[in-house]
Amino acid sequence: MAEVEQTPTLTPEAVGDEPQKAADRSGKSSSEQLVVTIGATVPTGFEATAADEVREKLASRAKISKERGKIYFEISIEYLAQVHSLRSVDNLFVVVQEFRDYQFKETKEDTLKDFKELAGKLPWSDPLKVWERNINYKKKKTIRKKPQQHTPSQEKEAKSQGGPIIKKGTEEELSQFTENLVLYSGESQSKIPEESPSANKDEGPNTSEKEKKVDETQKEEAKTKVLKFRVTCNRAGDKHNFTSNEAARDFGGAVQDYFNWKADMTNFDVEVLLNIHQSEIIVGIALTEESLHRRNIIEFGPTTLRSTLAYGMLRLCSPQLGDVIVDPMCGSGAISIEGICEWPNCYHIAGDNNPLAVKRASSNIWSLMTRNSTKERKPTIGLPVDSIQWDICNLPLRTSSVDIIVSDMPFGKRIGSRKKNWDLYPFCLQEMSRVCKPGTGRAVLLTQDRKCFIKALSKMCDVWRKVQTAWVNIGGLHAAVYLLKRTPQVFIQPGEREKGIAL
Ligand SMILES: C[S@@+](CC[C@H](N)C(=O)[O-])C[C@H]1O[C@@H](n2cnc3c(N)ncnc32)[C@H](O)[C@@H]1O
């Protein structure tokens, strides 16, 4: 059996003293505080952005995992609501225990025997208190259409762009050595760890009376009913002598024996995560049922961007009060919607040349507006956004009027074509350089057609300077996010520029 680490899950240098500061701010002594480690999955390539958000909003220093797309940070349990408000995280879990260098046994039988023994040795109590408190914040999964099923209008839309309909793959589906399997088995009686009275007392600052009542009722129900659970094993690495299924089965069987929970693959209360990445194992309990990246979008298009990635892209440009932020190829409007939510003191414009896309973006904006007013029980007031049908190559905007451009360009796969991009990309960069303010303007552009983009950019180095590149995985496609700064060079009409370069 590999040794169970008795030390805290994160190194002191990684965590810093922030949880202590959080405890001090709340006016409680650290002994009354339950500080736990939260794990979050984030868009790959945007781990540092997510860590920045955690530092800014939770005053906690996040550790970026060796495994891409994950960060870890410590918080006091009373900040759980704020954790759910983070905009760069997809899924959240509370860490039960981390093994940084797990010693797998030589044979499969011995390794699986170790997994069986592991369940009884883990420090479950605090993570389960977090799980219990989390019931208030957990968004229930909604039933959605399968992503690869496009509506006839979406198919028409993609075809009208000259692109084929491509079956949507996910990052998980395409990562080579990753398996993701779940366990289920028999049933028995529950043993629910008691919530400590102090943890019960501490309600977060944003918890309403209604939420408290729901919380209490659910807690009471949870204490009397048999809990249902499943184990999900995410495994990445090519040197394991067992499969995810075997690990989930044997570890899950032991969890079941230990707690007397009932296994249920689909309708579970507790999801135990067994994340195995090379020689690192992290056991956790899921705090989200549905990825937070779907928030705020009701009408999805053929290439709707994850809200979390949209947030990361916007954040790269550091929006300032009063900035005009434009997504000139907005599709369903994911970027502008994320912009309105997080930077309501900026003015956002979402445009697209496809009327169906503009209609979809408008519906999503409208839905956000009505939801906001219902939530706040206030009359509907407008949002600082407009949606417009336009052509990126000829924008109805004044020269030097835009502070920030953030856009997810056609990859030439589902939308447009690689061939068309050779014309489109140079025109895009040129028109963007016209509307963007010289000296201070910036653009964050996402594309998978990197060759075409870099070629077009190389001809515009008098107006655009590339300052950063982040590599992201979009449905299994290797794409790049470029941060460009507008140089102080005033815009010159294309014919004039060519003459200037020739001279
Ligand atoms: C990758 S999609 C953007 C997806 C969007 N981020 C979302 O969340 O739905 C690219 C968009 O560029 C639009 N587009 C293509 N050529 C355009 C052009 N010449 N002018 C404006 N928009 C264009 C397409 O209609 C498509 O909606």
Image (spheres, grey):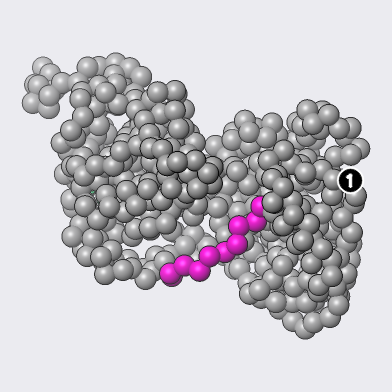
Residue 470 in the image, given as x and y percentages of width and height: 46, 40
Please tell me whether residue 325 is drawn above or below residue 502 in the rendered image: below
- x, y (%) of residue 376? 54, 42
Q: Quadrant of the N terminus?
A: bottom right
Q: Secondary structure at mark 1?
A: helix
Question: Residue shown at 44%/59% (left/top)?
Answer: 476
Is residue 430 among the parts visible in the rendering? no
Q: Provide the major secondary structure of the magenta segment.
A: loop
Query: Where the C terminus falls, by quadrant?
Result: top left
Q: Return the residue nearer the eye: 76 or 240.
A: 76
Check disc 1: other Cα within 10 Å, few if <14, some if 14-19, many if 20+: few
Query: Does residue 300 sit above or below 500 in this rendering?
Result: below
For this view, does 198 lie left or right of residue 155? right
Q: Which residue is mark 1?
A: 198
At label 1, the amino acid type is: Ser
Q: Which of 413/110 is in front? A: 413
Residue 147 visible in image: yes
Question: Where does residue 210 sit, x and y in percent of width and height?
Answer: 69, 51
Q: Which residues are magenta?
A: 137-146
Q: Residue at x 40, y 23 (%)?
A: 322
